[in-house]
């Protein structure tokens, strides 16, 4: 099953994609949202989690904000640097609404100040790119089971 969101500036492939995860209907706490403007990263998450968990892939922060206001997710992997709404702004928005989604920041930005801000805003983990697949799989297991 695929979800699509119409937005002219986005490619059809990455405007939002959801897989069913072993064909079973899952509770919201078992769903994963990945937000990153790098389509290669989205492909990596699809390969890691697409068969195991219900997965929504998005490449815009504002679209993810809208999705989070409509639906619940157990886990959010979130990039910081994006063109429309950066990850820290989205993280602050999530914190202000007391959403139960656990947020893992995934970023290539080396500044330690970003990590400190992310944790102050409620990030569950902060992972630097290039990331370790085993680490992300462990995080998903801890959070979603």
Image: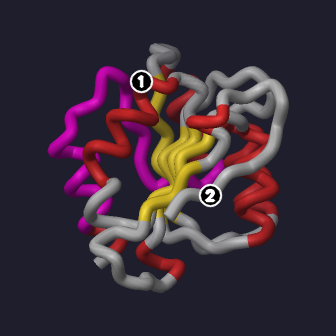
- How far, Cα to Cα, is label 1 from label 2? 19 Å
Secondary structure category for the residue under label 1: helix
Q: What segment is highlighted magenta in the picture?
A: 121-141
Question: With respect to residue 75, does 72 lie above or below?
Answer: below
Local crowd at mark 1 within 10 Å, few (<14), some, or many (≥20)? few
- In front: 143, or 62? 62
Q: Residue furthest left?
A: 134
Residue 129 location in percent, x, y? 36, 23
Residue 69 location in percent, x, y? 79, 66
- In front: 109, or 137? 137
Local crowd at mark 2 within 10 Å, few (<14), some, or many (≥20)? few
- The numbered disc on residue 40 is 1
Question: With respect to residue 48, does 140 lie above or below?
Answer: below
Q: Quadrant of residue 8?
A: top right
Question: With respect to residue 91, does 26 lie above or below?
Answer: below
Secondary structure category for the residue under label 2: loop
Horizontal side of 121 relative to 18 (left or right) equals: right
Horizontal side of 28 relative to 5 (left or right) equals: left
């Amino acid at each position: 099953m695929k979800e699509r969101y119409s937005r002219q500036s986005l490619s059809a492939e990455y405007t939002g994609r959801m897989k069913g995860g072993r064909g079973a209907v899952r509770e919201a706490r078992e769903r994963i949202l990945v937000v990153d403007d790098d389509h290669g990263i989205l492909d990596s998450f699809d390969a890691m989690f697409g068969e195991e968990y219900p997965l929504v892939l998005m490449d815009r922060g504002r679209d993810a904000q809208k999705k989070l206001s409509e639906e619940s997710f157990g886990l959010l992997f979130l990039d910081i640097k994006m063109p429309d709404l950066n990850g820290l702004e989205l993280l602050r928005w999530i914190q202000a609404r007391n959403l139960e989604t656990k947020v893992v920041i995934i970023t290539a930005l080396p500044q330690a100040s970003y990590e400190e801000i992310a944790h102050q805003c409620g990030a569950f983990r902060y992972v630097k790119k290039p990331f370790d697949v085993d680490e992300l799989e462990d995080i998903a297991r801890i959070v979603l089971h």
